Image: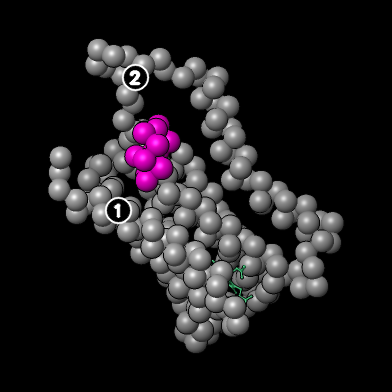
């Protein structure tokens, strides 16, 4: 969800100019990222239309949308470490697309829960938020995602100023742990899957802490 233009472009300025990747190649890579993000949704829609969502299709739908939302949030968090470690700064231009797709999946996750599971019973939703801790955490994560999605455009970066915009986007470090905790609390038997996502999150956050604390060269 961070701004695409923030990437340091090594080909601009300096004596040793690197060749800029062609616009066609750039567009193809961008289309591939877009398709990779949309593919799980298309596959889920196909399975829904062909009646292939198993014995409890509503549960499968809600859960699959949730798990893809969480995966994309983690992929978004992995972009900066990948860009630094692989020395590919231009990777950061995909953060916004990936973040917006994560938001779309989580919105569909919430909508399918409200529409297909609760039949738009908003009173029940309020009761769930108050009484079921995993729903409380999920809802908190969703509410915090909204300002990030709204301010994801270049216009908002200019309006807010880069520093304030970056500070707001620190919310992602609260949102993703809330998403993992939401998952952990709703699982009744096998806690391994949410723990695996939690471990990935710990590595991604740990890398940032390590980088911030290491002495500057
Ligand atoms: C950032 C926000 C959220 C994330 C990342 C997220 C993620 C997830 C994940 C990973 C699962 C489990 C999928 C599985 O079992 O394979 C899940 C399940 C679920 N989530 Fe969320 N979720 C979020 C927000 C919400 C919200 C706002 C609600 C409703 C108010 C909600 C309601 C549910 C329900 C009802 C289930 C299924 C529980 C069950 O079948 O027992 N989630 N979510």
Q: Position of residue 141 (x, y in %)?
A: 44, 66
Residue tagged by mark 2? 11
Q: Please tell me which of labels 2 and 1 falls first in the chain.
A: 2
Q: Residue furthest right?
A: 50
Q: Which residues are magenta?
A: 80-93
> What is the basis of the colouring in this image?
one colour
Apparent side of residue 171 relative to residue 64 in the rendered image (left or right): left
Tag 2 near tag 1, CB within 8 Å: no
Q: Is the residue marked by circle 2 packed among few (<14), some (14-19), or many (20+) residues within 10 Å?
A: few
Q: Position of residue 97 (x, y in %)?
A: 49, 42
What residue lies at 59% left-to-right and 45% top-to-bottom?
A: 37
Mark 2 → mark 1, Cα distance in angstroms: 26 Å
Q: Main secondary structure of the magenta part?
A: helix
What residue lies at 78% left-to-right and 59% top-to-bottom?
A: 48
Q: Is residue 183 magenta?
A: no
Q: Quadrant of residue 205?
A: bottom left
| Relative to 61, residue 27 above or below | above
What residue lies at 84% left-to-right and 61% top-to-bottom?
A: 51
Q: Is the residue marked by circle 1 packed among few (<14), some (14-19), or many (20+) residues within 10 Å?
A: few
Apparent side of residue 102 relative to residue 141 in the rendered image (left or right): right
Residue 208 numbered mark, or none: 1
What residue lies at 41% left-to-right and 51% top-to-bottom?
A: 77
Whether residue 6 can be seen here:
yes
Choose between 152 and 210: the one closer to the eye: 210
């Amino acid at each position: 969800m961070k701004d695409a233009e923030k990437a340091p472009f090594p080909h601009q300025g300096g004596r040793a100019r690197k060749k800029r990747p062609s616009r066609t190649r750039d567009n193809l890579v961008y289309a591939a990222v877009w398709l990779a993000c949309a593919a799980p949704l298309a596959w889920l829609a196909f399975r829904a239309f062909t009646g292939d969502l198993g014995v409890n299709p509503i549960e499968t739908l809600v859960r699959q949308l949730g798990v893809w939302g969480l995966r994309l949030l983690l992929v978004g968090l992995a972009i900066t470490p990948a860009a630094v470690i692989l020395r590919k700064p231009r990777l950061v231009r995909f953060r916004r697309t990936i973040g917006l797709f994560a938001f779309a999946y989580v919105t569909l996750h919430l909508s399918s829960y409200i529409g297909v599971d609760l039949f738009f019973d908003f009173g029940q939703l309020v009761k769930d938020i108050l009484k079921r801790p995993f729903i409380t955490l999920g809802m908190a994560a969703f509410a915090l995602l909204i300002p990030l999605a709204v301010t994801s455009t270049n216009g908002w970066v200019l309006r807010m100023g880069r520093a304030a915009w970056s500070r707001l986007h620190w919310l992602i470090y609260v949102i993703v742990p809330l998403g993992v905790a939401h998952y952990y609390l709703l699982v009744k038997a096998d806690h391994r899957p949410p723990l695996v996502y939690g471990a990935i999150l710990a590595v991604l956050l740990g890398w940032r802490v390590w980088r911030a604390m290491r002495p500057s060269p």
